[in-house]
Image (cartoon, rainbow, N blue to C red):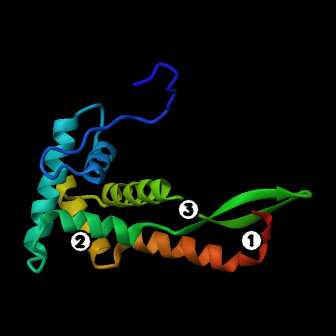
Amino acid sequence: MPRNYKSTAVFIKPDPRFGSMLASKLINKIMLDGKKSTAQKIFYDALDIAAKKLPEVEETEEIFTKAIENARPTVEVRSKRVGGANYQVPREVKRGRQETLAIRWVVDNARKKKGKPMAQRLAEELIDAYNGTGASVHWKENIHKMAEANKAYAHYA
């Protein structure tokens, strides 16, 4: 790497089972207190549970890929102050942020469910997102509705 290269990006490696960067990001989001092996176990157990409940899916990797795809927002609203008033301005979301938001929503909504092991909760959330239902997809739809409602302020972007 050249010496003058300055990046704030975190360099992450693909996960061991699928070789996927998306899976690695999801595992990192699940991880608490630096316990990556525990986070990996939760993620892979969740995928195994989801694969049993979705027998029509051939590739296990397809479950989390499609789940994240279904939870990704294409637009969001950002606050913009114009002449003493705050407007919610709809903006397009960059690909990396779409992925990050989708992963955050899936993991956070799985954490909100109580009374079951994390792998079970994550599996349920991934199945719901895969099917286009569930809290993560609902969150995305709410953001899209908000952006649609505030389309009049798009010229402030």
Amino acid type for the residue under numbered disc 3: Val
Mark 3 or mark 1, which has the lower sequence index? 3
Image quarter of the C terminus: bottom right
Q: Residues within 10 Å of mark 2 (few under 14, many from 20)?
A: many
**Residue 86 lies in quadrant:** bottom right
Residue 93, disc: 3
x and y percentages locating residue 137 in the rendered image: 41, 72
Amino acid at the residue labelled 2 = Ile
Of residues 50 and 72, the one nearer the viewer is: 72
Q: Is residue 55 left or right of residue 113?
A: left
Tell me, yes or no, if residue 117 can be seen here. Answer: no
**If you read the primary sequence from the N terminus, does the residue marked by circle 3 or circle 2 appear first?**
3
> What amino acid is found at the position of numbered circle 1 in the picture?
Ala
Instruction: Identify which residue is drawn at 34% across, 78% down.
Output: 133
Image vertical order of residue 14 relative to residue 94, above or below: above
Q: Disc 1 marks which residue?
A: 154
Q: Secondary structure at mark 1?
A: helix
Find disc 2 in the rendering and name its residue. Answer: 127
Residue at 23% across, 58% down = 115
